[in-house]
Amino acid sequence: MTGVQTCALPIFFIEDQPTTIEALGPALEARKTEDGKAPVVVLMPDRTLDVGRMVQVMDTVRAAGVDRLTVAAKNGR
C-alpha cells in the first residue's frame, strides 16, 4: 500500500517523500510490482485541500494505472 498525503500547497508526499503533481504519476508507476500491478493508494488530504485539487490528484493517480484508490480522513473538528 502506498500513502499519498495531499495539502493545499503544490507538494505531495509519497510515504514521507515530497513530490509534485507532475512527478506523482511517474512515482506511482515506478511502484508497480514485477507483474505490473499498481499499488493500493490511500489519499490522506489535509483540511485545506479544495475539492478541485483533490479531483486533480485522483485523476493523476488513476492515469498512472492505479485502480485501487481510497481516501482516508481524520475524524475531528
Image (tube, helix red, strand yellow):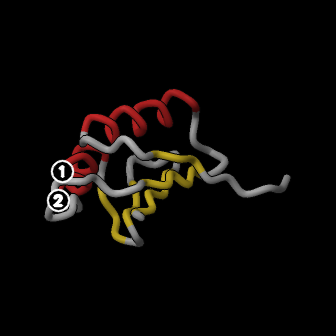
* CA distance for labels 2 and 1: 6 Å
In this picture, residue 15 sits left or right of residue 77: left
Q: Nearer the viewer, residue 11 or 5?
A: 5
- Which residue is pictured at 40% across the width and 39% down the height? 57
Disc tally is 2
Q: Nearer the viewer, residue 26 or 21?
A: 26
| Residue 2, numbered label | none
- Outermost residue toward the front? 35
- The spot of residue 5 in percent (x, y) is 48, 58
Name the quadrant containing residue 12: bottom left
How many C-alpha atoms fall within 10 Å of the one at disc 1: few (<14), some, or many (≥20)?
some
- Which residue is pictured at 42% across the width and 37% down the height? 58
- Please, what secondary structure does the residue beneath circle 1 have? helix
- The spot of residue 45 in percent (x, y) is 57, 50
- The spot of residue 16 in percent (x, y) is 41, 72
Q: Kindly identify the amino acid type of the residue bearing the numbered disc 2.
A: Ala
Q: Kindly report which numbered mark, 2 or 1, lies closer to the viewer in this rendering.
A: 2
- The spot of residue 71 in percent (x, y) is 57, 47
| Residue 26, numbered label | 1
- Outermost residue toward the top? 52
Disc 2 + disc 1, Cβ < 8 Å:
yes
Residue linked to disc 2: 30
- Which residue is pictured at 22% across the width and 50% down the height? 23
In this picture, residue 76 sits left or right of residue 73: right
Q: Kindly identify the amino acid type of the residue bearing the numbered disc 1.
A: Pro
In this picture, residue 62 sits left or right of residue 72: left
- Please, what secondary structure does the residue beneath circle 2 have? loop
- Outermost residue toward the bottom? 16
- Which residue is pictured at 34% across the width and 64% down the height? 18
- Outermost residue toward the right? 77
Name the quadrant containing residue 34: bottom left
